[in-house]
């Protein structure tokens, strides 16, 4: 392979050990071969998947089966190499170089690089820890949850769905059915490891969100406070806390979004903010251009945000949402957990903590 004038690209999830090793390998061979240009692009997990989804289609062939959190390819012309393992094999053959340092070193480097990238933004972060709960003995079935129902889980007139307005570009509204004899749900384990639920929980893992408090300070404060429960009791509902702990992820739109956070009724017909029943649309600065965006659901009319939120799953832009729903954060870690949540029927969710430095392991 003629290297002169070619550019080697190493793109991957910043926190991943494979990416860290591939990054250092590429930078090392660049010092050995001045004719080779090297571009390294660290990304969040959701940004990487969005990039990967597009790039493998452009590369075609074997790239369409790419599976790892790092992709390596040449440009001018395009040539797919593979992941970190394939890069190591290529470099060994071409340059006689092999990095034999242990993988735990690269794991530590990934965690440190990820932490520094979060600190550099000066934004607050929240992490949400999920576990599937198979016993919902304390939760009554919703009249809106009918197996095979063609309608959404939201009652008419009280909808906080992020698809309250018609539009041909939006996803359809699928039924979300319960499983006869078995209700699955999602709840959270606090840092101590105990699971405050009625039954036995199966931990799914954590997701980490960056909150754009410089753009949407009131919206971010509402979400953060509902994560921690720091505002205490609801002023509108007796024996209810302003806290996401135990609230349902009541809706999943495959390829669209997951939706939850109804801290009042649980099934998507209500909610409450820390400012009162609802609060204003702060701004629409953040566009819905990728998966993993965090935004506020509303009642289908302006300035009707409460506690319900959505997390986008679509890897394609959703411009129809841009002037209707306030996006205020993004997923930076835990895309695999989000995918498992998206594949669960009915899920119960809770959140813990606010700013996460050091990064949870």
Image (tube, rainbow, N blue to C red):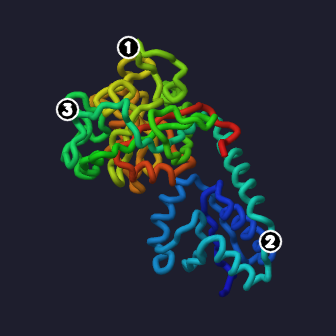
Label 2 SS: loop
233 shown above or below 329: above
Q: Which residue position is annotated with label 3?
A: 156
Q: Position of residue 269 (x, y in %)?
A: 28, 30
Instruction: Judge by depth and name the residue closer to the eye, 46 or 252.
Output: 252
Quadrant in which residue 251 is drawn? top left
Res. 281 visible in picture: no
Return the residue found at the far bottom.
1
Q: Position of residue 46 (x, y in %)?
A: 51, 53
Q: Residue at image x 34%, y 48%? A: 345
Q: Which residue position is annotated with label 1?
A: 238
Q: Which residue position is annotated with label 2?
A: 100
Quadrant in which residue 91 is drawn? bottom right
Q: Position of residue 30 (x, y in %)?
A: 76, 72
Judge left or right: residue 114 versus residue 68. Answer: right
4 shown above or below 265: below
Q: Looking at the image, is mark 2 or mark 1 earlier in the sequence?
A: 2
Mark 3 is surrounded, within 10 Å at the Cα level, by few (under 14), some (14 to 19) or many (20 or more) other residues, namely: few
Q: What distance separates the C-alpha of mark 2 from that of mark 1? A: 61 Å
Q: What distance separates the C-alpha of mark 1 from that of mark 3? A: 24 Å
């Amino acid at each position: 392979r003629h290297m002169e004038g070619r550019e080697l690209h190493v793109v991957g999830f910043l926190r991943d050990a494979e990416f860290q090793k591939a990054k250092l390998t590429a930078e090392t061979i660049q010092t050995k071969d001045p004719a080779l240009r090297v571009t390294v692009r660290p990304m969040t997990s959701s940004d990487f998947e969005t990039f990967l989804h597009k790039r493998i289609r452009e590369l075609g062939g074997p790239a369409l089966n790419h599976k790892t959190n790092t992709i390596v390819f040449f440009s001018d012309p395009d040539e797919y190499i593979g992941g970190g393992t394939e890069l190591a094999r290529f470099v060994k053959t071409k340059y006689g170089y092999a990095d034999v340092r242990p993988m735990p070193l690269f794991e530590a480097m990934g965690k440190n690089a990820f932490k520094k990238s979060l600190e550099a933004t000066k934004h607050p972060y929240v992490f949400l820890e999920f576990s599937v709960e198979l016993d919902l003995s304390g939760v009554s079935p919703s009249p809106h949850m009918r197996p095979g129902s063609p309608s959404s889980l939201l009652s008419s007139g009280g909808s906080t769905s992020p698809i309250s307005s018609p539009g041909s570009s939006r996803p359809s509204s699928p039924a979300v059915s319960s499983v006869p004899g078995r209700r699955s749900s999602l709840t959270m384990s606090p840092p101590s490891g105990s699971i405050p639920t009625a039954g036995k929980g199966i931990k799914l893992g954590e997701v980490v969100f960056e909150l754009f408090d410089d753009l949407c300070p009131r919206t971010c404060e509402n979400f953060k406070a509902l994560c921690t429960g720091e505002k205490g009791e609801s002023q509108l509902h007796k024996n209810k806390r302003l806290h996401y702990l135990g609230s349902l992820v009541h809706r999943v739109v495959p390829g669209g979004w997951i939706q939850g956070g109804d801290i009042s009724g649980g099934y998507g017909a209500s909610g409450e903010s820390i400012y009162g029943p609802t609060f204003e649309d702060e701004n629409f600065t953040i566009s819905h251009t990728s998966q993993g965006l965090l935004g506020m659901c509303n009642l289908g009319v302006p300035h009707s945000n409460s506690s319900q939120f959505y997390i986008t799953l679509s890897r394609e832009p959703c411009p129809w949402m841009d002037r209707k729903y306030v996006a205020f954060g993004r997923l930076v870690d835990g895309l695999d957990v989000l995918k498992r949540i998206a594949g669960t029927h009915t899920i119960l969710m809770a959140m813990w903590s606010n700013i996460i430095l050091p990064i949870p392991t």
